[in-house]
Amino acid sequence: MVVRTINRKIFRYLLVSVISVVIGQSLLYLFFQTMGLDAALSNFLSVTLSTIPNYLMNRYWVWRKSGPHDFKREIAPYWIIAFSGLGLSTLFVFLANRIWDSWVVVNCANLSAYGSLWILKFIILDRYLFNTNSKKIDLTTKS
């Protein structure tokens, strides 16, 4: 039963990721190729905008979490994770654009950065952010 639940959760997480990739890559193409914005700015905008539906789909559909959103224990850590990925993908996108100057390479650079963080993000979301059985992390408190 536990394995089935985990497999279902991983499958839903995978589907949310696919939807998010389509949204993010479409926005990246729109900003970079169509609107002619800088690669790094295009990447920033696409990640910022695609993080919103990604958070909501993960929270409600993958982890079946309902009720009020906790800014300190859910939203802020989720955005920290997202913007960590943004930092890595922006570096990849910047380098790809400087070397190849191609929207295909820019999109591939973005995908490779996020793909490398995909498993780590699942573990953090599952064990800390959306797990109702364990102690939550709070990345916004000062030590």
Image (cartoon, grey):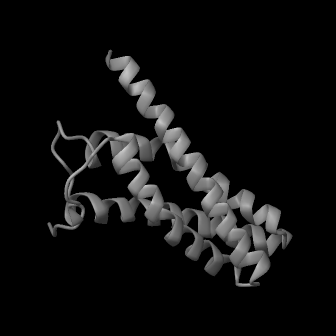
Q: Residue at x 57, y 76 (%)?
A: 45
Q: Residue at x 84, y 73 (%)?
A: 101
Q: Is residue 21 left or right of residue 136?
A: right
- In the rendered image of this protein, does residue 20 appear above or below residue 47? above
Q: Determine the image quadrant of residue 8.
A: top left
Measuring from the top left, give residue 80's x and y in whole percent.
Answer: 37, 64
Measuring from the top left, give residue 67's x and y in whole percent.
Answer: 20, 53
Q: How many marks?
A: 0
Farthest top residue in view: 1
- In the rendered image of this protein, does residue 73 appear above or below residue 64? below
Q: Is residue 91 left or right of residue 135?
A: right
Which quadrant is the N terminus positioned in? top left
Q: Is residue 68 left or right of residue 40?
A: left
Measuring from the top left, give residue 73's x and y in whole percent.
Answer: 21, 58
Q: Determine the image quadrant of residue 23.
A: bottom right
Which quadrant is the C terminus positioned in? bottom left
Give whichever of 115, 32 is nearer the camera: 32
Q: Residue at x 25, y 41 (%)?
A: 131
- In the rendered image of this protein, does residue 57 appear above or below residue 62? below
Q: Residue at x 62, y 72 (%)?
A: 43
Q: Is residue 129 left or right of residue 56?
A: left
Give whichever of 96, 30 is nearer the camera: 30
Measuring from the top left, give residue 140's x and y in whole percent.
Answer: 22, 67
